[in-house]
Amino acid sequence: MTDDLGLFPLDLVLLPTERIPLHIFEERYKELIGECLREGRDFGLVRSSDAGMAEIGTRATVTEVLQELPDGRMNIVVEGGDRFRIVDLTDGRAFQTAEVEPVDDDADDVDPDDVERALQVFRRLVELTATEIDEPDAGSPLLAFELAARVDFGTDLKQELLELTSSQERIERLTELLERAADAIALEREVTERASRNGKVTPLRPDS
């Protein structure tokens, strides 16, 4: 089943359950967001870069209007919902529109051991960064997205996770990315500590 959706192309990726702030200043997007607010509708946030527009994006819901300025500009918070695939770009509005279809996950089960491994690595990363952040429910069907939304992986990796349709493959890939991030932070700390000692181990003095 397809439907027509107003698009907001940006060089960023919004994951399901993720919340991000947006500054709305172009006239066409003032129109789009204004309609969504009045009619309680979603819009599609899809990555757009020099390489073109991504095929898969995320439905976004405005959860909060932080500020409305006299000239119509807005600062808002949006939350990622279901994923969609662009079937065909359409026109006729000031903003880009498209015929889209839902993107559903495959009917595969996630290994509970892999879920626990992902949570363990996430906890390690949180501890290393001394960040106060809540941990999502291990039983959530969107756990991988919820964990990924709490870490800044950059647009390329977030788009990769967004496009995966295997829950098992997604949790495995996420764990790999979390481990890589945690190891990089641990290594950076070690290098900093060594540099503070001029790269040498300070032995105990004889009179210590």
Image (cartoon, rainbow, N blue to C red):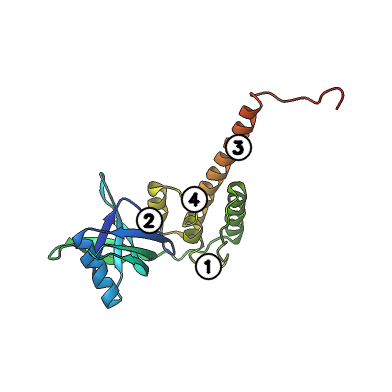
CA distance separating discs 2 and 3? 33 Å
Instruction: Report the residue marked by disc 1.
Output: 140
Circle nearer the N terminus (4, 3): 4
On the image, the x and y values in percent for residue 191 come to 60, 31
Q: Is residue 1 visible?
A: no
Circle nearer the N terminus (2, 3): 2
Q: Which mark's residue is nearer the viewer, 2 or 3?
A: 3
Q: What residue type is labelled 4?
A: Arg
Q: Which mark's residue is nearer the viewer, 1 or 2?
A: 1
Q: Which of 202 and 117 is in front in this view?
A: 202
Farthest front residue in view = 70
Binning the other alpha carbons within 10 Å of mark 4 as few (below 14), some (14 to 19) or many (20 upward) gives: some
On screen, 51 above or below 71?
A: above
Q: Which residue is drawn at 27% across and 76% down?
A: 38
Q: What residue type is labelled 3?
A: Arg
Q: In the image, which disc is placed on residue 189?
A: 3
Instruction: Report the residue marked by disc 2.
Output: 163
